[in-house]
Amino acid sequence: MVFSKDALLHVPDKDALFAEIFRVLKPGGVFAASNWMIGHDGEPSLEMKAYVAAEGLSFAMASPARYAEAMRRASAIWSSAWRETSAVSASRWLCASCSCACN
């Protein structure tokens, strides 16, 4: 099993990240993660950029579609038994409730 909680967003190269995850994952193994994502693959809002700078964070957020694409690419290289890749975003309801303008 490979498990990650809110850490994937700190790695800018998502393709390399998932290539390494799938490289070490045993056949039939499970990859489980939760992560902060952005609703698009463009630049974050000015408010989000200001927050990241003020907190000294190293965010490299990507959209659920970008994560799914990187997982599919990596699984095609490393896993002949890969069944399905899915990435689901909860950012819309989270951001709606906290009004953080990160979408």
Image (cartoon, rainbow, N blue to C red):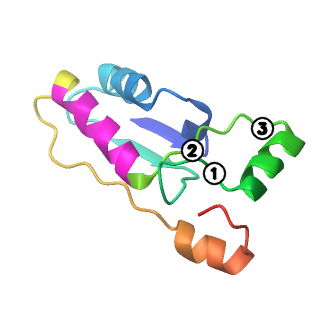
Rendered position, 16 above or below 98: above
Mark 3: give few (<14), some (14-19) or many (20+) Cα within 10 Å.
few
Three-letter code, disc 3: Leu
Mark 2: give few (<14), some (14-19) or many (20+) Cα within 10 Å.
many
Q: Is 66 included in the stretch rendered in magenta?
A: yes
Residue at figure coordinates x 69%, y 67% from the top left = 101
Q: Is disc 1 in contact with disc 2, using a CB cutoff of under 8 Å?
A: yes
Mark 1: give few (<14), some (14-19) or many (20+) Cα within 10 Å.
some
Tag nearer the camera, 3 or 1: 1
Quadrant of the image for the N terminus? top left
SS at mark 1? loop
Q: Which residue is mark 1?
A: 44
Three-letter code, disc 2: Met
Magenta part, dominant SS: helix
Rendered position, 54 above or below 92: above
For residue 9, side relative to residue 56 (left or right):
left
SS at mark 3? loop
Q: Which residue is mark 3?
A: 57
Three-letter code, disc 1: Pro
Horizontal and vertical percent position of residue 4 = 53, 40
Please provide the residue range marked out in magenta: 65-76
Residue toward you, 74 or 26 = 74
For residue 58, side relative to residue 74 (left or right):
right
Q: Is disc 3 in contact with disc 2, using a CB cutoff of under 8 Å?
A: no
SS at mark 2? loop
Residue at figure coordinates x 38%, y 45% from the top left = 66
Q: Which residue is mark 2?
A: 61
